[in-house]
């Protein structure tokens, strides 16, 4: 074998590896952008008791019990929590994205 043949094979291998890495990076970027900007969890409120501070939810097909002092993380920055007024009284159940209220699911 001659040196130019070895260099040619190495160059071809590096180009193929670079192409595969670029394709994987592109697929990863598309998935990240979808979950960060487009995807939203499906949340259904089944039952709410504000006096006890308990709510029964179905989040993405799973039964969830939400208590007054907690947030339920749905994934990718989405949470479900009880919203309060200025006197710290529970007034609503809300869907939150990155600590910003996206949708109020139920008002007392």
Image (spheres, rainbow, N blue to C red):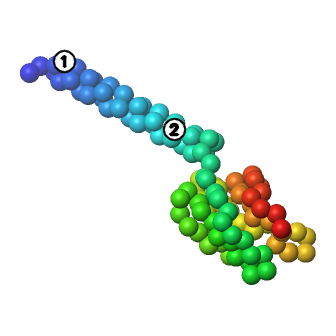
Task: Please provide percent x and percent y for residue 103.
Answer: 75, 53
Task: Measure the alpha-carbon separation of dots 2 and 1.
Answer: 37 Å
For the point 45% across and 36% down, the residue is 27
Farthest residue in the bottom direction?
Answer: 52
Task: Please provide percent x and percent y for residue 23.
Answer: 41, 31
Quarter containing the C terminus = bottom right
Task: Looking at the picture, tell me which residue is in the foreground, 1 or 57.
Answer: 57
Is residue 71 among what the camera can see? no
Tag 2 residue: 29
Tag 1 residue: 4
For the point 77% across and 62% down, the residue is 106
Task: Please provide percent x and percent y for residue 49.
Answer: 74, 75
Element type at marker 2?
helix
Element type at marker 1?
helix
Quarter containing the N terminus = top left
Mark 2 touching mark 1, by CB under 8 A?
Answer: no
Q: Quadrant of residue 22?
A: top left
Q: Residue 72 vs residue 86: left or right?
A: left
For residue 54, above or below residue 105: below
Tag in front: 2 or 1: 2
């Amino acid at each position: 074998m001659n040196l130019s043949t070895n260099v040619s094979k190495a160059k071809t291998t590096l180009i193929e590896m670079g192409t595969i890495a670029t394709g994987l990076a592109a697929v990863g970027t598309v998935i990240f952008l979808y979950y960060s900007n487009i995807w939203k969890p499906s949340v259904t409120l089944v039952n709410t008791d504000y006096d006890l501070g308990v709510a029964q939810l179905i989040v993405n097909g799973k039964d969830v019990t939400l208590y007054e002092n907690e947030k339920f993380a749905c994934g990718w920055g989405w949470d479900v929590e009880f919203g309060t007024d200025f006197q710290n009284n529970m007034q609503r159940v809300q869907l939150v994205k990155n600590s910003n209220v996206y949708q109020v699911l139920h008002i007392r």
